Image (cartoon, rainbow, N blue to C red):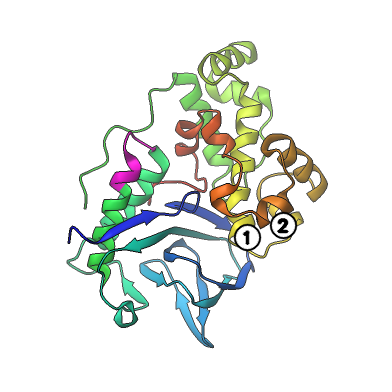
Amino acid sequence: MSGRNVELVRRLGPTVADYPPGSAFGPRRARSHEFVWLLAGSATWSHGGEPLPLVPGTLLLVRPGMRDTFHWDPRRPTRHAYVHFRLAGDWGPDGDWPLVRELGGRPDPMGALCHWLLWLGSACPPGWRQQARETLRLLLLTFTGGPEPGPGPAQLPGPVVAMMRAVRDRWSDGVARPVPLPELAGAAGVSVSTLCRTFRARFGLGPVAALERLRLARAEPLLWQSNLPLSAIATQCGFADAYHFSRRFHAVYGLAPSAFRAAPPESAPASPVETAGLTALEELTPARRTAAP
């Protein structure tokens, strides 16, 4: 087994994306292996003209070279977890591998491994990439848990944690709406000035700016992993229209959403969540990266 290596594709998981009703992605030509599992809602995955229904509790393996299409639930939002990876070493012929396997009701650890992968992607502990690679390797071997997650998010001030709980409730339907500063301070149980000082001392920017970066980061999987127009992505990320979304995206990322969509993940600008040190905040929201329920 030592010759079987797995490499994560940067910026493409392990992570989660929320899709509004009726979203679609493809047709595309897969460039890497990808595990896909639904956390809520449903989808239909098509490859070679054969539609395959996807529901929570099933794990899909997409292989390089496949030309496929996703159509998500037309009636309700869907939460979709995924991780892209490349293989090296002697794995044997993958043509014999199944397309889907059940996560629940089995004695194998696939469900726990998926849970652990998402936790690694959201918490980003030291050495998480190596842990994720090994978890992926075990998941792939199981498809053809890891220890329990350690301490939660990095130590955050109490008012910040309380504020983010309120944000989590506001975003629980998958739409990352802006929240007025007085409402944030009220949820935190402190004054507006105290909340701003606390945020600037911890993150170097205020709470409204921090939440905007979390909202913009939610556009990454929607730009790379869907056919949604900018107007729909803007709505999903809580912006009034595509113009406002594009203007703020360009200001933070340094290029327009359309250019970002066309850029390979390896060469795209860094996530503003990572550069601003906001990963601990992201873990406290039902964002594109989250622990499995």
The kind of residue tagged 1 is Pro
On the rendered structure, is 256 left or right of 54?
right
The residue located at (56%, 19%) in the rendering is: 199
- What residue does disc 1 label? 20
Label 2 near label 1: C-beta < 8 Å?
yes
* Residue 236: image location, x then y, percent: 66, 51
Marks 1 and 2 sit apart, C-alpha to C-alpha, by 8 Å
* Residue 100: image location, x then y, percent: 36, 75
- What residue does disc 2 label? 232
Classify mark 1: helix, strand or loop: loop
Q: Nearer the viewer, residue 204 or 188?
A: 204
* Residue 207: image location, x then y, percent: 61, 24
Residue 104 part of the magenta segment = no
* Residue 155: image location, x then y, percent: 38, 23
The residue located at (54%, 76%) in the rendering is: 68
The residue located at (23%, 66%) in the rendering is: 141
Closer to the chain start, of discs 1 and 2, is 1
Above-or-below relation of 183 to 217: above
Q: Nearer the viewer, residue 278 or 167?
A: 278
Classify mark 2: helix, strand or loop: helix
Residue 41 appears anywhere in the view: yes
Mark 1 closeness class: few <14, some 14–19, many ≥20 residues within 10 Å:
many
Look at the image and give the residue range highlighted in magenta.
124-131
Residue 74 appears anywhere in the view: no
